[in-house]
């Protein structure tokens, strides 16, 4: 399963970028850019924000899929370690006990991977790349932020103004999520997971869960759409 989606920025966003070369009155920090100098939403940043949504929207059906999958794995593990003579009885018991804990903790968060089981079914995220607008003059906004710092020597509070180059609202990005080894969870697993992912992605549209930094200042609100919702290949909504 590979799910493509569009993300449209509804507010400015800033994702932990790099320091800029110092110029008086110039930009101090810039949002993350790709090799073309375009704003980008890195896979790691999007995955982290999406994981919070999944954490707050548990799905028993997906938990059961993973539980059944892991039960089969436990039987194979038991057969393997019981056939080996170099394990003590205590070591064999611990291996089985640890595996049973993983089974008992089955949840929809296993979609992001299971610790110690690198080849388990999981979601793989792409970077979200800019697809419109084409004019780079429409990509960025220069924002000024002011933080209050306590001076180490005097103990006094002083303002520390910074100038940030952030991505603007109205930008359209294309991303995709692949369900790696999804067929291992059963014949209906990919369909179940795809529906769940779409439901969770649309929660971004409520504006509670956001991407990047300075979310408390109103940054990072995105709206998710899919091609079947009426979005064209450029992420525009068809009339």
Image (cartoon, rainbow, N blue to C red):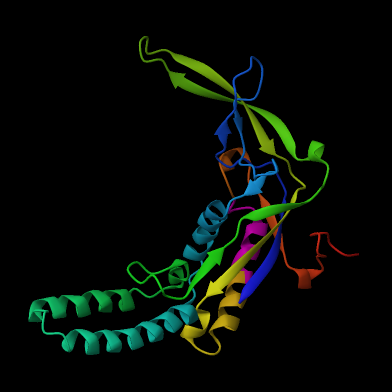
Identify the main secondary structure in magenta. Answer: helix
Left or right: 35 in relation to 138: left
Q: Residue at x 23, y 74 (%)?
A: 98
Q: Is residue 207 one of those drawn in magenta?
A: yes
Please identify the quadrant where the C terminus is shown: bottom right
Name the one closer to the observer, 12 or 156: 12
**Residue 227, position as x, y percentages in the image:** 77, 69
Above or below residue 59? Residue 81 is below
Q: Is residue 76 one of those drawn in magenta?
A: no
Q: Residue at x 55, y 73 (%)?
A: 179
| Quarter where residue 188 is shown | bottom right
The residue at the far top in this view is 154
**Residue 51, position as x, y percentages in the image:** 50, 60
**Residue 234, position as x, y percentages in the image:** 81, 59
Above or below residue 21? Residue 227 is below
The residue at the far right in this view is 239
Counting every numbered tag in the picture gives 0
| Quarter where residue 229 is shown | bottom right
Left or right: 61 in relation to 100: right
Above or below residue 191? Residue 214 is above
Name the one closer to the observer, 140 or 135: 135
Name the one closer to the observer, 80 or 111: 80
Q: Which residues are magenta?
A: 198-210
Above or below residue 28? Residue 229 is below
Q: Residue at x 62, y 38 (%)?
A: 31
**Residue 47, position as x, y percentages in the image:** 53, 58
Please identify the quadrant where the N terminus is shown: bottom right
């Amino acid at each position: 399963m590979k799910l493509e989606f569009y993300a449209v920025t509804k507010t400015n966003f800033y994702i932990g970028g790099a320091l800029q070369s110092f110029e008086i009155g110039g930009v101090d920090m810039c949002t993350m850019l790709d090799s073309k100098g375009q704003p980008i939403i890195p896979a790691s940043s999007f995955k982290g924000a999406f994981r919070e949504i999944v954490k707050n929207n548990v799905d028993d059906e997906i938990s059961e899929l993973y539980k059944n999958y892991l039960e089969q794995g436990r039987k194979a593990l038991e057969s393997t370690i019981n056939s080996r003579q170099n394990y003590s009885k205590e070591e064999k018991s611990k291996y089985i006990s640890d595996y049973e804990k993983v089974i008992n903790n089955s949840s929809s968060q296993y979609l992001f991977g299971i610790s110690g089981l690198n080849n388990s079914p999981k979601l793989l995220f792409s970077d979200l790349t800019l697809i419109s607008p084409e004019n780079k003059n429409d990509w960025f906004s220069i924002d000024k932020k002011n933080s209050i710092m306590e001076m180490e020597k005097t103990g006094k509070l002083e303002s520390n103004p910074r100038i940030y180059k952030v991505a603007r609202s109205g930008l359209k990005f294309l991303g995709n999520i692949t369900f790696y080894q999804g067929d291992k969870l059963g014949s209906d697993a990919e369909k179940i997971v795809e529906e769940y992912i779409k439901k969770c992605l649309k929660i971004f549209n409520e504006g509670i869960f956001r991407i990047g930094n300075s979310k408390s200042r109103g940054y990072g609100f995105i709206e998710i759409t899919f091609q079947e919702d009426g979005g064209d290949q450029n992420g525009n909504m068809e009339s």
